Amino acid sequence: MSLRFTRGLGLIVDKNSSLRQPRVWAALKNAIAGIFGGCADNRAGSLPQVQLLESRQLLSATYFVSPFGSDSNAGNISAPFKTIQHAASIAGAGDKVEIRAGTYHETVTPAHSGTASAPITYEAYNGENVTISGADPISGWSSYKGSIGDASMSWDLGEGNNQVFVGGQALNEARWPNSSITDLSHPAKETISSLSGSPSSATIYDSKLSQPAGSWVGAIVHITPGQAWDGQTGVVTRSSPGSITISYLYHSSYAVLKKGDTFWLAGKMVALDSAGEWYRDPSNGKLYVNAPNGASPASQDVEAKHRLYAFNLNGVSNITIHGVNIFAAAITTSSASSHVVINGINAKYVSCDAVAVHGWYSSATDGIVLAGANDVIENSSIQYSAGTEIVLKGSGSIAENNVLKDADYNVINVGAIQVQASNTTVDHNTIVNAGRHGISIEVPKVKVTYNFISSIGLQTTEAGGIYSEGLNAQGSVMAYNVIENIHTAGYGGTALFIDNYSSGWVIHNNVTSNVDYGLKMNFTSTNNDIYNNTLGATKLAINTNQQGNWHGTSILNNVFLAGTVFTPGGNISGNVYAASTTKGAGSVKAGASGATS
């Protein structure tokens, strides 16, 4: 009601009522005077108190959604809506959207924000199996050639963004050399044995490239050039039996293609020669699939990615997502999306951006992106991403108690978790298998604690379990992390890697094992506090390029289970050295002041 009279409070008018229009309001006051003007009490002639009532939500609602419902229903448990989006267009502060079991092919874009005390919650009802999918079924299959079938695919997300699934497993875009579809973190690649050309255009000679002239023109070439720190893509401009000529972006003398580097090709019909591959022809909109078991695609559950996001939370705040599965899609937010909580989700194939013209640069828009202040992702499982899997871009955000697997299989310069905002926390996460870094940190004032990281740097060199470069960390903390199984070519893999002029780190109580290097600091690295760590390694417990100085850096009370190399200037004392590390080149005895013995 917009108008009511209450004993003691008098007349209460909702602030949004039409009664607040000036002419209506004046008439209302005159009417009240006529009604109450003759009241006989000790305040004879006084009017009742008139107050404006602020708009408020008095009751929260629960809406139910089911694949068997209808958006014209009432939205209760016996008459649920059909789409989550319909509920999301209605739900307001304090409301819950309870999602019944099934698969929902939609992007959910909430129309309203919750409040700090009354968030809007989207959750699987009673723990039921709910999947929000970015993929749609492909039907109408015809036999094309052999075991290959073809069907119309009317949408196209663009080269590198399309993805095709059979029975919930991603197939490979047709590629050379052929590779397993079950192990995206260890793709097959060809090693360059001979090449010629300039830094931005090279001819690769390989007798295995036996296809007719012109077969590969326009193909996407994936390379890890030079030092192989990161991958990038180029384009084939000419091909003939035994060679291809490629064009790619030259951006650094450290990333010039050379003998011994690796490459693979995709994006051409000629590569569709193996079970478990697909190709979409942009000229006719047809999808060609060679199913993994050799059966006709018509008898398979074939889907193709159609949407980037399961939830688009741009511009809304105080939203909770709980207990749902996400398939072939991600979650995006904006800087205005504060206090978003993502809890207990299970997400697979969150991104597939397979084109990276500049491998060293990444905007880190893949995966679950938390761009607003005080956002949280917790107790969740994420597997398979061409890039990162969690991005923290909002101040005060938290990634806690998540399990992340098979990140960055396209090997751009990111970690499974990418930290891009200060005052963030990365705590108690498990990270297994990543093409480059485990956790990559770009900003100061962060806390990275109690994480388990294993098997990263799988396709690059000089990767870090926890990595940061050129940063004044301003007291950032790496503590109580366990990091293992990192070995790479080139300069090797490092568990705790604060690269190139890093300062202001507090690194303590970490344990490393079966890595090339336990901890590495390159060039001048000042005012770092490193204590109480147990650093096991197959090469060196501590490594450095020994350039610059370590003034103000303290390395105290650590246990070194391998040799150590220090840059002069640091305070190095109270450490315990394994017997085998106290002698020989690159080793320092306990109590040494910083010079390498």
Image: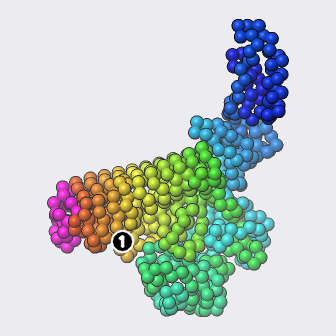
Q: Is residue 452 left or right of residue 579?
A: right
Residue at (79, 34) in percent of width and height: 22
Is residue 55 depicted above or below 348 in this figure?
A: above
Q: Is residue 421 left or right of residue 320?
A: left
- Taking depth in this image into account, of 164 and 248 the one nearest to the observer is 248
- Image location (x, y in percent) of residue 105: 71, 55
Q: Report the number of discs.
A: 1
Is residue 55 depicted above or below 414 in this figure?
A: above
Residue at (57, 54) in percent of width and height: 335
Magenta-tinted stretch: 570-597
- Taking depth in this image into account, of 514 and 336 the one nearest to the observer is 336
Q: Is residue 10 visible?
A: yes
- Image location (x, y in percent) of residue 2: 77, 29
* Magenta-drawn stretch contains 587: yes
* Magenta-drawn stretch contains 140: no
Q: Is residue 476 left or right of residue 13?
A: left
Is residue 334 depicted above or below 81 in this figure?
A: below
- Image location (x, y in percent) of residue 579: 17, 62
Q: Which residue position is annotated with label 1?
A: 492
Q: Secondary structure at mark 1?
A: loop
Which quarter of the rendering shows the C terminus? bottom left
Residue at (54, 88) in percent of width and height: 201
Q: Is residue 257 left or right of residue 561?
A: right
- Taking depth in this image into account, of 111 and 484 the one nearest to the observer is 111
Where residue 34 sits, quadrant-wise, is top right
Callout 1 environment at 10 Å: few (<14), some (14 to 19), or many (20+)?
some
Residue at the extreme top:
41
- Image location (x, y in percent) of residue 590: 16, 60
Which quarter of the rendering shows the N terminus? top right
Q: Main secondary structure of the magenta part?
A: loop
| Amino acid type, label 1 | Gly
